[in-house]
Amino acid sequence: MTASTTRRTTAARSRIAAVGAIAVAGALLLTGCGDQTESSGGSGSDSGKSNSAPLFDKLPKKIQEAGVLKAGTNAEYAPMEFQEGGKIVGVDPDIAAALGEKLGVKVEFTSGSFDGLITALNSGRYDIAMSSITDNKQRQEGLDDKGKKLGPGVDFVDYFVAGTAVYVQKGNPKGINSIEDLCGKPAAVQRGTTYEKALQDQSKKCTDAGKTAIKIQSFENDTEAQTRVKSGGAVAGVNDYPVAVDLVRKADNGNAFEIVGEQVDAGPFGIAVNKDNKQLTEALEAAVNAIIEDGTYKKILAKWGAETGAIDKAVVNGGK
């Protein structure tokens, strides 16, 4: 996600829209996940030495033997990851399925609380977390917003780029043209995302300039934030750019919201991996590059209208 702990700041759960300080183990993180929904990606292959997938040998032995890569996500961010017909679908599940083909394993997604994903990953519940999570130094190093060490952090394999977008009611009745126009006004956002951090940073800029702080309304999930904007309880919402684009296109058949201004603070989304699992990180990096090279990657992005987030090469810990 986009903002500093993504959902989710991501692109942009800009999710690059803080898991930042929130994406680390410690008191700032929720250890529990919500209702769990599982979905599989990839064709999967029988584990063992006979597996013919091109990158199978790069995987840790434990995952080879299991034949499964367990992935945590927060499936509330169409088109990146969302639930449809009881399955988790979207950009991330499709990319994961393609990675599974190269690695010779099945990728199984479980949906839970976004701000609990990194904690669950580092506790061993998941092998990876893939949920439009913005790759940044805070998450890599396990730091809070003030630079205090709270946990081990994670490594990221970057696979997408997105920024934070501001969306408002259709017709823009409050005349909001950019994130700078939110000083002194109520704005809705999902808690624990990098775009929540983007609002906090902008609010500080407001007060530093002698203006009133933004009245930030943080919600457990993005649907609540959207509802707040739609009802007029907030003049705007912020989200990852590709998520906001999809929201504008689909909500009330395109009649509920519109995006104002340009996306800001663009940065990479990354697949989060436990820092002790360097072999898996290297395998995923190779797999992302493989699907980029054979054209599968761009086909997936085109399917979901997310081509603007395409990268040319996978990078490990490219976020700043």
Image (spheres, grey):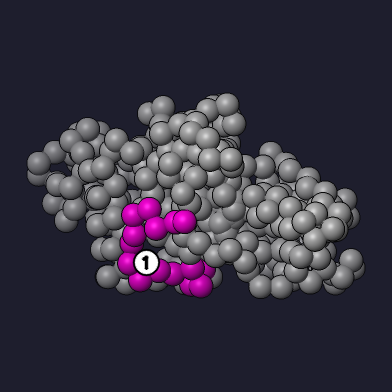
The image quarter in which residue 298 lies: bottom left
Give the magenta-colored segment's residue range.
306-320
Tally of marks:
1
Amino acid type of the residue tagged 1 in the rendering:
Tyr
* Crowding at mark 1 (Cα within 10 Å: few <14, some 14-19, many 20+): many
**SS for callout 1:** helix
The percent coordinates of residue 154 (x first, y second) are 40, 41
Q: Is residue 222 visible?
A: no
Q: Residue at x 62, y 61 (%)?
A: 164
In the rendered view, does 215 fall on the left or right side of 110? right
Q: Is residue 288 above or below residue 42?
A: below
The image quarter in which residue 276 lies: top left
In the rendered view, does 293 fall on the left or right side of 145? left
Q: Residue at x 84, y 58 (%)?
A: 210
In the rendered view, does 187 fall on the left or right side of 36? right
Q: Main secondary structure of the magenta part?
A: loop
Q: Is residue 244 visible?
A: yes
The percent coordinates of residue 247 (x first, y second) are 68, 61
Name the residue tied to disc 1.
297
In the rendered view, does 230 fall on the left or right side of 24? right
